[in-house]
Amino acid sequence: MMKILLGLVAAVVVAAGGFFGFDLYTQQRIATEIDAAFAQIRAGGGKASHGPISFNLLKRTVTIADIATETAAQPPVSVKIATITASGVGQADPTRFSADSIDVSNAEIGVGISGAMNLRVAYKSPRISVRDFSGPAGVKPPAFESGLDAIRFGLEQFAHITASSVTAEGMAGTVNFVAAPDVSARGDFSYSSVAMAGIKDGKIASVRVDGVNFTFATQAAGKTDKLTGNLENAASYDVDTAALAAILNPQPGDDRYVRAYRQATMGAYTFTSAQGVRARIDGVTIDDVGARPARIQLAALLAMLPASGTQPTPAEAREMMEKIAGLYEGLHLGNAEIRGMSFETPQGPLKLSAIRYNLDNGKADFAVEGVDANTPVGPFKIGRLALKSFDIAGMMRQLAQLATPGQPPSPTEGA
């Protein structure tokens, strides 16, 4: 009996040793793969570091602490995460990684766009949760030349991810924008909750935001203002991130139409200005939002914007107006509606029942309904005012001709 008992004890010890040995081997393998991914970022001129890595074989859980990365592009894209824990991990395919859940604590993400815009946006969230995740493994990010490159790469990778849901609690952020020495804005905003559902093949079934509060301080032409406000219950449905990626990376000659959103909605929106303006909008609905990416040329337009404190030459101004005309020709908005607008201004109240519009191929149908205002000469009311097939792109090109010294517009263009 004693020999049997000793044999059983020996077997348990051997088995336990093998188990923990495999546990340690798995942890070392995961650590090696993570270190290789971080080394790839550093090889591109960026910064990447992490703290301890732990692995629980029974629960198939991996935890990484103190993650910090920063791209070499200027301004950089930066990410900081206190801990990221993946539970129920698996890798049935060497090119895919899956997890029942991924929980991120204290995440910070910063993205900037340099040039004339000098835009910097930063987000923070105490907790981000992902459920039923599957995505590519061993992806080596390239060296990014700009923040747009990093965003484009992220959208391309998103097309290979599936997840039943992604939620972010208490997300907050800041935005800084400088267009000229006397044109700038700085804002703080916070989201009560952000939730995405049904993520697959670069599409998102729904994106919901319960509420947003914001404060913005602006400066323009020597005048300062402060805006505060909040937005309730914003949502987008059938979002296609592949369309957004195509807009950022248009292919020459590709004039196909891509839809980015099936529908976007917004609840009550209110804001107050330090200049004495108070406004409220009861709701917004926009159906069928899309674009023809080859016509938009967003990156080229941003590159053309004059540097802070400089004025474009007439030739540069004409080329910029042409790009803006192409932007309008490339955008599509179907059946957009803004309802229940009211404004309190130092000159008196103004109310509009609705604004309705659509935009396609640079032309818009536009209607204003139920205008009710007080003016210095008495009440002013409009039942309905509509414009049909208003050529916005054509108007931009006419303005470009007006900016040409010594070349007045033709009678047709000036009409």
Image (cartoon, rainbow, N blue to C red):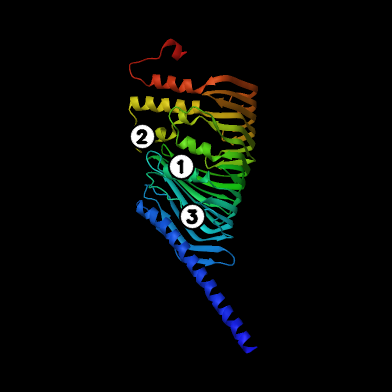
- Per the image, the residue denoted by label 3 is 108
Foreground pick, 398 / 93:
93
Q: Amino acid at mark 3?
A: Glu
Please name the residue shown 60% across and 32% down the image: 288
* SS for callout 1: helix
Please name the residue shown 48% across and 31% down the image: 293
Q: Mark 3 or mark 2, which is nearer to you?
A: 3
Neighbourhood count class around disc 3 (C-alpha, 10 Å): few under 14, some 14–19, many 20 upward: some
Please name the residue shown 45% across and 23% down the image: 396
Q: Amino acid at mark 2?
A: Pro
> x%, y% of residue 16?
56, 75
Whether residue 318 sits left or right of residue 372 in the image: it is: left
Whether residue 45 sits left or right of residue 326 in the image: it is: left
- Per the image, the residue denoted by label 2 is 306
Neighbourhood count class around disc 2 (C-alpha, 10 Å): few under 14, some 14–19, many 20 upward: some
- Per the image, the residue denoted by label 1 is 152
Measured Cα–Cα span from mark 2 to mark 1: 23 Å
